[in-house]
Amino acid sequence: MTSFELSDDQRYRALRARDRRFDGVFVIGVRTTGIYCRPSCPTPIQPLRKNIDFFPTTAAAQRAGLRACKRCRPDATPGSPEWSTRDDVVSRAMKLIGRGRLDTGSVAELAADVGVTERHLRRMMLEAVGAPPLSIARAQRAQNARTLIETTQMTFTDVAFASGFSSLRQFNDTVREVFAATPSELRATSSATPQAATGSLSIRLPYRSPMAWRYACEWWEMRAVPGVVAVEHGEIRTALRLPRGTGLATMRNGEGWIDCTLELDDLADLAPAVAQCRSMLDLDADPIEIDEALRALPALRSHVDGLPGLRAPGSTDGFMTLVFAVLGQQRSVAAARTIAGRIVERAIGPGQDGLLRPFPEPAEIRAIDFDGIGLNGRAIETILTLAERFEGRADELAPGGDRHAIADELLSVKGIGPWTTNYVAMRIFADPDVHLVGDLVADRAAIALGLTAHDIDSVRPWRTYLTHHLWAASPALRGTT
């Protein structure tokens, strides 16, 4: 159940139970103390119902003049699954803000991205999340600043500008207002080991348990483009293309979080780097609700119980995922991985052992020689057409982009069909409700389990996760009728 579907009495019951599954779904504002908390806050004395207000986001609580609780740190909770599920203007704007859009652009440009006026966007966000776009971005900057204060030895001036603040004074005022502490006090009380300000830092990316980490590793290992992504010993490494440069993310599973080491050309790219990593691993999903919906299908129940917390892997590079989809449709997944690696080598040259680099940009793809690469003329024509179409527009292939307009555009390209556009919706735009019609493996698994079209529709809006469970169950179902 999402934040908007809950009544205040239901939210209060979640608070009384200190239920961690609602962390990030909403926050609790306490009028008598002037602070806001997550539902699972371990404070021994819980506030009375009459003294509580509920907010859909931390930004809304901050806008109401409340400060973050120092005990439960509600600013560090996972993002609300509401924005991963919905496909409307507010959801797209929230995803773009999460990827740092307002650190490099204006609210007017954000409004243009989602197809409305600046005034209308502000009104819609106030109604939906209780805060305007700049307040949402401010809350994100505050959390980024806290991460850098507590985990690096960067000067506060560098932290301020790396976090997206326009001045040191704005940084100091915001930190004091949001956390009721100065930057010096936050650094002094931190239990984290400070790291040198070299562009590398280790952070925790929280998620809602459980997490089927082994499945995530196996899934990414099969689709890891050589030279761009590597999976080994339960660790996923990926190169990142960021607004101000490039980066490298190394991710390992923790206990309710991902241990993530980021090496960035520019620490000001922290927000978009975190957003890409969260999208890659689908960390904002609510696995309890999703698993419950899928377990309602008796034929699927044992498979869901065997893989609790299965996520729907996303993408760190939409154009790379689009090219991989075309290759996978033409050939097998294994062949697509091999040919994608050849494309990387021809576009940007052979890499050193273990060195990961971002996938080539569309302009680089257009410049390579495809002769002898292992593709027929039709596939080469499709890839070159896509590179021409998205040159200078690759940032539209990301969560927050207009997936319906992109789908219409893709279908106009020779060699692109419904399977590809649905796969793009699933991977690039993080649509949780994709029924991948025509996928041979998923279709055979559904038939083996005896799932009907009615069964598949009954799990909406989680058909993307059903598709992943069908893929995961396929090896065990081979040979059945």
Image (tube, grey):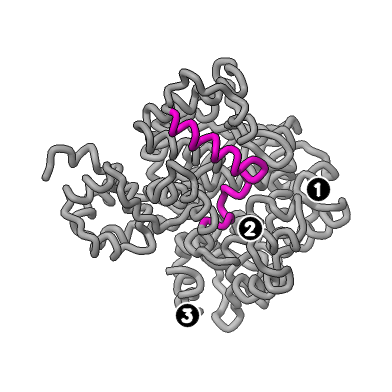
Distance from disc 1 to disc 3, alpha carbons, whole Å, reads 40 Å
Q: Which of marks 2 and 1 is nearer the N terminus?
A: 2
Circles 1 and 3: CB distance less than 8 Å?
no
> Which residue does the numbered mark 3 point to in the structure image?
9
| Residue 386 falls inside the magenta stretch | yes
Relative to 394, does residue 264 appear above or below in the rendering?
above
Q: Can residue 63 be seen in this view?
A: yes
Q: In which quarter of the image is residue 359?
A: top right
Q: Which of marks 1 and 3 is nearer the N terminus?
A: 3
Distance from disc 2 to disc 1, alpha carbons, whole Å, reads 18 Å
At 29% across and 58% down in the image, what residue appears? 294
Q: Quadrant of residue 440?
A: top left
State the residue lying farthest toward the bottom: 50
* Horizontal and vertical percent position of residue 377: 44, 29
At 21% across and 45% down in the image, what residue appears? 444
Secondary element at image label 3:
helix
**Labelled disc at residue 45:** none
Relative to 375, does residue 276 appear above or below in the rendering?
below
Relative to 389, does residue 83 appear above or below in the rendering?
below
> Which residue does the numbered mark 1 point to in the structure image?
160
Q: Residue 479 or 220: which is nearer the viewer?
A: 479
Residue range of the region highlighted in magenta in the rendering: 377-403
